Image: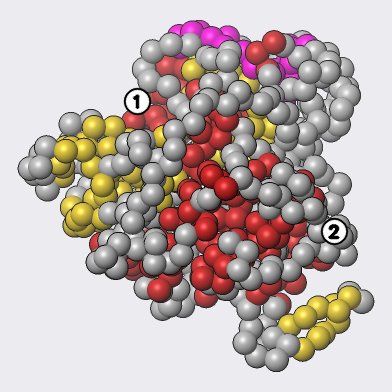
Amino acid sequence: MDTEVITDALKTGYTLVQQYEIITVLGQGGFGITYLARDLRLDQKVAIKEYLPESLASRDRDFSVRPKTKEHVSDFKAFKERFLDEARTLARFKHPNMVRIQNYFEAVGTAYFVMEYEEGEPLDAKLTQSGKLKEKAVMNIVLPLMSGLEVLHDAGMIHRDIKPANIYLRKDGSPVLLDFGAARAEADSGGKTSMTSMLTPGYAPIEQYYTDAKQQGAWSDIYAMAGVIYRCITGRRVVEASLRSAARLRDEPDPMKPATKIAKKRYQEHFLRAIDHALMVLGEERPQSIEEWRKELKGQVEAPLPEGCEPSEPVELAPEERTIADLSLDELMDDAGEPTRHKAKPKGKAKAKKRKRVVDSASNTGIGRRSRDKKENTTIGGKRVATGKRSKLPLVIGLCAMVLLSAGVGYWKVEILDKMPWVDPVTGQTFIYIPAGCFSMGSKNNEEGRYADEHPHNVCVDSFWLSKHETTQGAWGKVLPDNPSTFDRGSRYPVDKVSFKNVRQFIGKLNKMGDDSFRLPTEAEWEYAARATLETPYPWGDKFSEKKTNCGECATSWSNISTTKVGSFKPNLFQLYDMHGNVSEWTCSPLNEAYDGAEKRCAGKKGNRVARGGNWSSSASDTRSAYRMHHAMNYRTSTLGFRLVRR
């Protein structure tokens, strides 16, 4: 792993507090980094979570973590203390289906907590292989996890990142819930945050898109767990909560097919109704506690039936199909009052079922929890909206903004945060905030001009900042003295004829001059930003059109002649210019025709790199969002340039 390119992670072999030796990085998000390490005293593997919010801090060359500016110091310290408070709270929990926190400490300017390293198969990997699970298998996974969540909720905590990737199945079949890095206390949050909300599209409820933590509660984790079950029984994710909220505001049908329809007659009616109840859009409409929802899943209490669904015929289970769902609370506890483990029976491998789908990405907005007060009605835009004493104004504003922004496009994702464009003080380049989301990467089989290595597949990316324009010759000159460009025509023209090694030299020097936060985009980030919520081959539609960008067949004044000034054509919906023409752009991703995940990461120091986008001499089809090419790292040509990501 080339940590200089993709992350602020500690290097392999680095030892924390003379006890924990870093082995590798397990994962990285906006809030911090998770490592696989070895406890040198106990000689065993552990997982270590490091507090390193990318919006507030970065790592120096001496490995210490520091706030980026003086303005970030207060927030960095406040969130670090909350991080440690949560570690102290979580360390008290002893539950067989929750990962155990063994230690927490401060070092190199930041905070850490140490967790048991659980070896096993993540649920998302199992679902990729088997497609769908039977009701018994689902309940054997979910009910023990719900028991663990109940302990967490009773302590005033919520997990906030429940998804198949955070559920591991041990070798004995018992489940364990991992990654509590997103866990937050319900109280004392003040409803304020300066960091991006942590969420996974398809599993995050609508209230999690809103920065007021007081709107979240047990009902939020219940939604996410129901999303996991929905994935297990249907083979697809729940439609994003923001899209569902928008449909509700417009008085349109819910775009998500309820479980009681999509899985009718294949699972028990009470089981499906409990899933749909937990997946209601509004937090106040869902079960408010694990105990309430558990009774619905087990058929002890009848859950409401979604509108438009008719009850299906009962599903009869064989006598030997008695599951953990049928066990009493006493049977789930041992003599000491601790939850017991129940081993799942080994199963034969199920044949994977191929499915073709496009994961939508949408905007986010806020929503409230159940109000205990008497509800009132108000009218907004001619529609009656139920309200409690707590103001629903943030919800209404958020939903209206999302509807306006998403009009006429396939999908959209917007975070309700103050994300104004940022200007790099060194180069003067403007960076646009690109929200996290999911999309179908690659081209459809019937797309004109497509290549065999563009097969469509679903990809999710974290939020990032991307330069509004291709790196200009003016920006280059503020970092390195020699202009390599073939078309040396002015500061507003893109720098061209740069090899990957030239770009790496530029980034290395820029990071020393600034806040050490720049890199090239991954191939997935580049295409996600280029598409800007659209599924069409081109940003202007399904068919190629002339004079929309600078390419060889674009019939512009510069076609097959030279580059032109950046920003000479209209931007895409993310307000990014020249993604499809002028110069092709380097990414940090390695060449991989199989799209096996390499497109979502940066490569090491060797191997070819993928370049994206059309250029001033390319054909029309090469300006498509899905078009990809690759070059050796020392390759230089007048058609190659780049743009930067700010971490």
Classed neighbour count for the residue bearing mark 2: other residues with Cα under 10 Å, few (<14), some (14–19), many (≥20): few
Residue labelled with disc 1:
1
Q: What label sits on residue 305 in the rendered view?
A: none
Relative to 536, is 280 above or below? below
The mark that comes first in sequence, 1 or 2, is 1
Check the image and name the residue furthest to the bottom. 374
* Label 1 SS: loop
Image check: 252 left or right of 154?
Answer: right
Relative to 195, is 256 above or below? above
User: Which residue is depicted at the point 62% across and 13% down?
Assistant: 629
User: Which residue is depicted at the point 73% across and 68% down?
Assistant: 304
Answer whether residue 644 is visible to the viewer in this image. Answer: no
The residue stretch that appears in magenta: 615-637
Is residue 595 or residue 134 the one in the foreground?
Answer: 134
The secondary structure that most of the magenta stretch takes on is: loop
Relative to 508, is 77 above or below? below
User: Which residue is depicted at the point 77% across and 22% down?
Assistant: 444
* C-alpha distance separating marks 1 and 2: 53 Å
